[in-house]
Amino acid sequence: MPPPNANGSLHVGHALFVTIQDLLIRFKRMRGFKTLWLPGADHAGFETQLVYEKKLEKEGRSRFKMDREEFYKETLAFTLENKKFMEQQLRELGASCDWSREKFTLDPEIVETVYDTFEQMYKDGLVYRGLRPVNWSTKYQTSLSDLETKAVERIDPLYYMKYGPFVLATVRPETKFGDTAIAVNPNDRRYQEWIGKEIEFEGLIGPIKLRVIADEYVDPAFGTGVVKITPAHDKNDFEVAKRHNLPMVEVIDRYGKLNDRCGKYAGMKVMEARKAVAADLEAKGLLEKVDESYKHTVLVNYKNENDVLEPRVMAQWFVKMADLGAKAREAVESGKIRIFPDFQKKIFFHWLEKLEDWNISRQIVWGIGIPAWYRPTGSSESGKELEIHVGREAPKGTNWAQDADTFDTWFSSGQWPFASLGYPDSKDYKTFYPTSVMETGYDILFFWVMRMIMLGLYRTGKVPFRDVYLHGLVRDAAKQKMSKSKGNVINPLDMSKKYGTDAMRMALIIGNTPGMDMSLSEDKIRSHKLFANKLWNIARFILENQKEGDIEGTPAISAVEVTYLKQLQNLTEDVTKDIEEYRFYMAGEKLYHYVWHTLADVILEESKPILKGENDEARLSRLWTLYQILTRSLKLLHPFMPFLTEEIYSSLSDQKNLLMIEGWPAE
């Protein structure tokens, strides 16, 4: 089970994954496979801390005014309480998983596995601590990986500033105090004479000297074709600086304020400083013009679009992704891992081409702490040059300080398949790894699935799963994203209470094409409640017409009844093949139409006069046939509608077992 975040109530996306995975596990169980559906919950690092910080805000408190241990204990209590609530909701949605094996990403054995992986990767040179640009949240005081960012389109002023003989365009004039070069494209004829020269001009807080460099990164069509290079506050500029051996000058601190390198602007927040710098440039005649309608994208916190992320160069822990990515690609290209639907493979490969080293350290309290220790080297008391030790305990000696950071939650959850099964020695690991199917939403193909493949191959030498089935997002009837602000959220637990869980599950399956978003409305759920009623009434009609001893033995049946049973056999073969090939929506639709339009509308209607007639032989053969059709229909529908089918099956006179452990009808 992709472990749901243990920080709140389940939503309709959870209901979808429970429905699909439960359908698969019930189907395989009935087919005679040795099955395990292992449940779990995710501590969800940053996301849970975000939820708990909002709770604190409502209470007039802040984590920044709390002791670290106190904040952790409160968050743990909050998470464990939510975890219990969430697990009960999973049960209500029909999840037939093995709760005796339930895991939590903060279980000691899971944490030990995560530590082992980190330490091994460090020894193998795949993990390093480096000074690189990160996405910094000034609001939450932590770095975020590229996974936790969102690019949004904004309209901001584009300032054309005079830099000595040049005019250049920038959205961020407040970072000018950290400039270490001027750059042009090497093929731009307008500026050939300046390449390699140093220019000197008057700035807002004193004279400035900058070298003019040439780099392919510069787009001659942007602005005037001249750009300033600010390596400490722009990811692309950082790469330019590495290529040209430029210094880095940090001018914005961790709180989003200009520092003491910025003269009179020191202490100002970014937006305040931007306006002040622009106004002073204009007053000094150094602002040529302003384009007020410049459209561009900015990176924001994916959980809070008001939290614009500040690029900062910081020492963080990174995972080298090139070799891991190559092995993940080979696993999919070779067919060791199959992705459904097939078009998602192209997206998988596209993400692999864009891989950069992965920042796995977070400056938050809630999560798995990084097992690392630091102390200043003999040549540096400032702490800027550090000796690093990776391990659970500090080495012998003095001045060792423990790393206060925590792992990115995707680093721990990326190890979920083998960690939750007790790698490397447990019976479950040896029996069930690699797992058969990973079913999850397409939106976390890059976030999670790719990382599970990489870390699984690295740690175990095996793929973590054979098949990946990706479902789409659940949208409202108008195909709009569900959100509380729009008032279009469908709560699956409310719908289950109102219409029954089986109706909810059928509504989530039928019409749900693999890898595509689906529309869900209350009307659709209500219509499947009617289907559930129809199935109940069919069963009641057949059972009410049955007398003791009526279905014992196998009577001679008519040619029509042979046709009906053959028709059902064909349906069984179709449904079985559809489920095996992950066409759940087609299987569900075929069963729906058979029960409603063939069994109810045709077969039962034709049977009514026979069951009321005087011909006992015809009545018995028809009743026996109807009973066979009913029991097989219940078995075929059980993975889709477990509650109702189990209830009806328990009322059959000759059935002693639970339906969920009965055999699947033979094709």
Image (tube, rainbow, N blue to C red):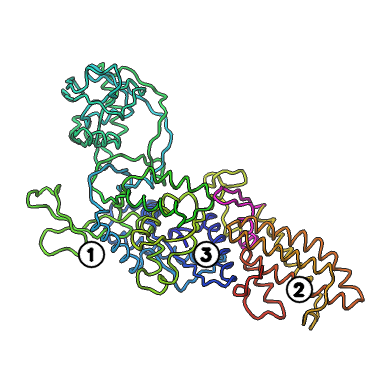
Q: Residues within 10 Å of mark 1 (few under 14, many from 20)?
A: some
Amino acid on which the number 2 mark rests in the picture:
Tyr
Quarter assignment of residue 107? bottom left
Q: Nearer the viewer, residue 575 or 532?
A: 575
Amino acid on which the number 1 mark rests in the picture:
Arg
Which residue lies under the disc numbered 1? 392
Q: Nearer the viewer, residue 278 or 288?
A: 288
Q: Which residues are magenta?
A: 496-523
Label 1 secondary element: loop
Can you name the residue that lies furthest to the front here?
334
Q: Quick check: can you spot residue 474?
A: yes
Q: Nearer the viewer, residue 651 or 240?
A: 240
Mark-to-mark CA distance, 3 and 1 = 35 Å
Q: Earlier in the sequence, mark 3 or mark 1?
A: 3
Quarter assignment of residue 233? top left
Which residue lies under the disc numbered 3? 90
* Picture disc at residue 627: 2
Q: Residue at x 31, y 39 (%)?
A: 310
Residue 83, horizontal then vertical, whole percent = 44, 64
